[in-house]
């Protein structure tokens, strides 16, 4: 039964409820080490991923998955090599979106059909490398399929390709819409049957890849999108030149970033996956069923540590100037897709649970007004130069999604503990 609005659970206070442990004095622990000590040892700005939290999240997702549903990690969320080596035995495959990510996936130890290569602008060299490695090329257009076919004919090899589908629906309430309407991603679902009817004999058919959207916190919406994605794959399979080997249903699971965000309710997702798996096992017993997640597996396991260089007051406002900024953490500055800029969780590393009594604007060192990590951060009033701040929800789309060369500051160090 649906509860009335007045009976709904209160929004999760993300900024006050990090997943990380604290020491006896309330200092942030990463692994078993104080964050302030890691900052001293390795310098700042510094990204730190807590491996125990990554493992715990993967275990939690495994608990949602019925038998037969495989879990892939989308490397674009965080391609740190040490993280990939950690995830290699815990997930069933990797999904990549460039030749560089393909090399990282191969170096980490996944091979062949356990790797899917997506992206709307693959170079011929990347297609050739994917073919040589035996990975699944998720073809994004008829033109890309023709180029892949030409490369196969010239080389005498037979690549394995799936069709990435642009569905006629999207994942509503998503941070990024990847399907529905005109999209650069994938092949419009209504055009797929004719493309399958003329499938080239020199290319092996792998199946379908659907990714309707990302960063969604509504479990009911995610569940509905997964059900529709599987139904779409099942309909299109009737036109396939051979039995599909893979249905990749994408993911879209979101994490809470901002004050007031609620965590994803996974109960509807569990129910939908159980229904999908049951139908799938009867109709497509030879076809792998894949769930593809990135941010959800690693995003909350990471922090960005930055040291306060200066504290100043300007016309009634308190500013903290730090050694890390938007060039090293673009997403936290609000310049990575946010329509309305809001603050990421931000804590004083030496006193994670110390109540904030002063409102600060937290900036980086760059000569641009865009270099702001927080505008409304409530932090302890005794913060001084030398203190270390921790930006939460930083395990995904951090260093690799930032313009680290801007103004030629040193790149951030990245660490797995």
Image (cartoon, helix red, strand yellow):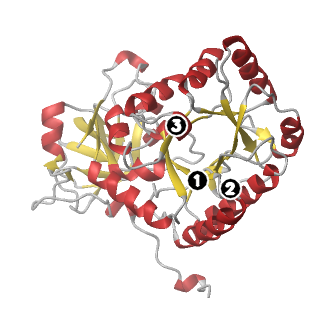
Q: Nearer the viewer, mark 3 or mark 1?
A: 1
Which residue is labeled 1 in the image? 252
Q: Are marks 3 and 2 in contact (CB under 8 Å)?
A: no
> Rounded to the nearest whole Å, what is the CA distance between mark 2 and mark 1?
8 Å
Identify the disc placed on residue 335: 3
Quarter of the figure with the N terminus:
bottom right
> Which residue is painted at 19% across and 31% down in the image?
43
Tell which of 389 and 315 is nearer to you. Answer: 389
Measured as percent of width and height from the top left, residue 32 is found at 15, 52
Measured as percent of width and height from the top left, residue 45 is found at 27, 33
Tell which of 79 and 288 is nearer to you. Answer: 288
Number of other residues with Cα within 10 Å of mark 2, as a class: few under 14, some 14 to 19, many 20 or more: many
Q: Is residue 32 visible?
A: yes
Q: Secondary structure at mark 3?
A: loop
The quadrant holding residue 163 is: top right
Which residue is labeled 2 in the image? 171
Q: Is residue 328 visible?
A: no
Measured as percent of width and height from the top left, residue 174 is found at 62, 54
């Amino acid at each position: 039964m649906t509860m009335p609005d007045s009976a709904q659970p209160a929004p999760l206070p993300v900024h006050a409820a990090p997943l990380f442990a604290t020491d006896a004095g309330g200092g942030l622990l990463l692994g078993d080490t104080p964050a302030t000590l890691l900052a001293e040892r390795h310098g700042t700005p510094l990204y730190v991923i807590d491996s125990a939290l990554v493992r715990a999240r993967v275990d939690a997702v495994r608990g949602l998955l019925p038998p037969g549903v495989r879990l892939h990690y989308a490397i674009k969320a965080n391609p740190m090599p040490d993280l990939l080596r950690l995830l290699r035995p815990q997930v069933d495959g990797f999904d990549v979106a460039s030749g560089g990510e393909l090399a990282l996936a191969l170096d980490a130890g996944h091979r062949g059909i356990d790797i899917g290569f997506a992206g709307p602008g693959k170079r011929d060299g990347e297609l050739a490398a994917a073919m040589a490695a035996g990975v699944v090329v998720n073809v994004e257009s008829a033109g890309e399929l023709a180029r892949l076919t030409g490369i196969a004919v010239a080389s005498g090899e037979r690549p394995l390709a799936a069709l990435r589908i642009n569905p006629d629906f999207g994942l509503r309430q998503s941070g990024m819409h990847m399907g529905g309407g005109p999209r650069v991603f994938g092949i419009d679902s209504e055009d797929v049957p004719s493309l399958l009817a003329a499938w080239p004999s020199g290319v092996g058919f792998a199946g379908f890849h659907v990714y309707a959207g990302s960063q969604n916190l509504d479990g009911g919406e995610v569940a509905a999108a997964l059900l529709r994605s599987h139904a779409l794959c099942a309909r299109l399979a009737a036109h396939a030149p051979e039995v599909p080997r893979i249905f990749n249903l994408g993911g879209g699971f979101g994490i809470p970033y901002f004050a007031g965000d609620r965590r994803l309710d996974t109960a509807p997702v569990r129910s939908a996956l159980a229904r999908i798996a049951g139908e799938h096992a009867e109709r497509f017993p030879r076809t792998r069923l894949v769930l593809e997640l990135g941010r959800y597996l690693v995003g909350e396991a990471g922090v960005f540590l930055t040291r306060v260089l200066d504290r100043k007051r300007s016309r009634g406002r308190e500013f903290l100037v730090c050694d890390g900024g938007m060039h090293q953490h673009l997403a936290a500055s609000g310049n990575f897709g946010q329509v309305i800029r809001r603050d990421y969780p931000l804590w004083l590393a030496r006193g994670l649970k110390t109540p904030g009594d002063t409102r600060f604007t937290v900036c980086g060192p760059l000569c641009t007004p865009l270099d702001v990590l927080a505008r409304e951060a409530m932090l302890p009033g005794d913060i001084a130069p030398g203190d270390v701040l921790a930006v939460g929800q930083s395990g995904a789309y951090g260093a690799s999604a930032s313009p680290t060369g801007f103004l030629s500051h040193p790149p951030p160090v990245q660490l797995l503990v």
